[in-house]
Image: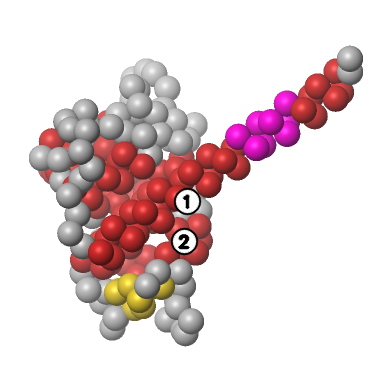
Amino acid sequence: MTTAKDLFFLAMERQVNQPVGQGDLSLALAGAELIDLLGAGAVVLDGDRIVPEGNPSPDDRLLGEAAEHLVRQVPHERVEEWLWRRGGDLSGSYQAALEKDGQLAPRRGGLSPFGADRLELVDSPSRSRALSRWEAAEPVLVALASVVGIESGQSEDEPNLDDEAVTTVLAVVSDAVMELEAVRQRRTIENSAFANLWRGP
């Protein structure tokens, strides 16, 4: 399993009490993939640019797909550019992959923010692993979850991260999610103003 899949599992697990926007989650999933690629030695960061290292073949299909889409020409892609390009409806891709693998199943009732289908996690070793990382307050998973609004409630302290590249990715993910929220708010204001214009005085 990967950090991205663990994050998706966590978002599904917390969907009732702490629903996560698909756009926010997609950006965070793209960041999680990049962190896993850093950990696997598939890429390094040169400042905020992603420099591929060799041609690794990750065991995970979606992570392998991410590796295949790395920009290998100079100048290399910035982390922010990667998030917006790779993160387009990435949560939908993870949902489809996990459904195909039998990790998600139709639920008996209730609503799900993940598409029109009503889905829930099935009991599986992958789900247990994700929850174990969360309960152990694994710093990267806690940080990514916090960015999309899932709070651990275990500590008010910032996660202790000693990897500069990972810290850089997390900071850019946070900025991208805030930018997406600003766009949402601006559209809400514009739509409201347009509606008021049509209603008249």
In terms of sequence position, does the residue under pointer 1 or pointer 2 come before the other? 2
Q: Position of residue 194 (x, y in %)?
A: 80, 29
Residue 104 showing in the rendered view:
no
Which residue: 79% across, 24% down? 195
Image quarter of residue 121: top left
Q: Position of residue 188 (x, y in %)?
A: 66, 31
Question: Real-space Cα distance between discs 1 and 2?
Answer: 7 Å
Q: Please name the amino acid that badge 1 sits on.
A: Ala
Give yes or no for contact between labels 1 and 2 (Cβ–Cβ under 8 Å). yes
Q: Which stretch appears magenta?
A: 185-192
- Asked if residue 185 lies left or right of residue 95, the reply is right
Q: Secondary structure at mark 2?
A: helix
Which residue: 50% across, 53% down? 88
As drawn, the label of residue 176 is 1
- Asked if residue 135 lies left or right of residue 31, the reply is left
- Residues 139 and 63: in front is 139
What residue did someone put label 2 on?
80
As drawn, the label of residue 126 is none
Which residue: 23% across, 55% down? 2
Residue sitting at the far top: 201
